Amino acid sequence: MRPHRPVWLAVLTAALAAALALAFVPGALATKKDPQATGTDTLLYRGATTVALDPGTAEALDSLGVSVSPVRPASAGKSGISFPITFGLVSSDTLEGQIRHVGGLKLSAGDTSVYLTRFFIDIDDEPSLSGIVGVGQKSGDRAELFTLDLSGLKVEPGKRSIKLSGVGLKLTAGAAEALNGAFGVTAFTEGLTVGTATVQARTLSAPDWGW
């Protein structure tokens, strides 16, 4: 049985409902046969999620000889590494949906490279970010990479836009095990704070077909 929805979810719901129902709590997208429109959802487009690497984690990676670089069309800038949003849809009624991205990260040390690409942000009672993990840019399997810490979440809705900042990214046990195995180290641990994410996108109301 899932735990009761935490306090932050109720606060987030109220804030977004007051701002033309611009909600952001993605879960897994689902489809139904013969759906019927029951309200409105919010479509996210023309945006990106930018991740600022935690200074402590950056120093640790450097000491291990592990470099981090963006996989196109992701790009690095002063604020961090930005991953373009290809599609996002959130329900203003159930607060479920998903935000998908292109590009990713390449972690390299010596002759070893690990690619983390095609990120999906999924948030319900257990917020997470998944991606394709592989030794090549176009190979691998999808796995949960980070849990999302929303304790510092800040929501800034606009007329046709939304910005969410202060989302902490913490390494999952599976991702830590995979990275330790790939690079032959033990430095990657479950719960390691990797960085902070900021989501910015344009928004558009769309029919709710019942998720």
Image: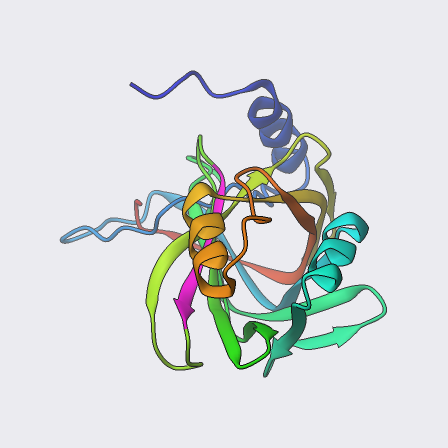
Which residue sits furthest right?
Answer: 78
Q: Residue at x 44, y 50 (%)?
A: 177
Q: Residue at x 78, y 56 (%)?
A: 59
> Residue 157's spot in the image, x, y percent?
72, 47
What range of the chain is rendered magenta? 127-134
> Residue 77's spot in the image, x, y percent?
80, 73
Q: Residue at x 61, y 34 (%)?
A: 17
Q: Residue at x 41, y 76 (%)?
A: 135
**Is residue 163 something that shows in the picture?**
yes
Q: Quadrant of the N terminus?
A: top left
Image label count: 0
Q: Does 83 sit above or below residue 91?
A: below
130 drawn magenta: yes
Q: Does 18 sit above or below residue 144?
A: above
Q: Quadrant of the C terminus?
A: top left
Q: Nearer the viewer, residue 207 or 156?
A: 156
Which residue sits furthest left?
Answer: 33
> Residue 4's spot in the image, x, y percent?
43, 16
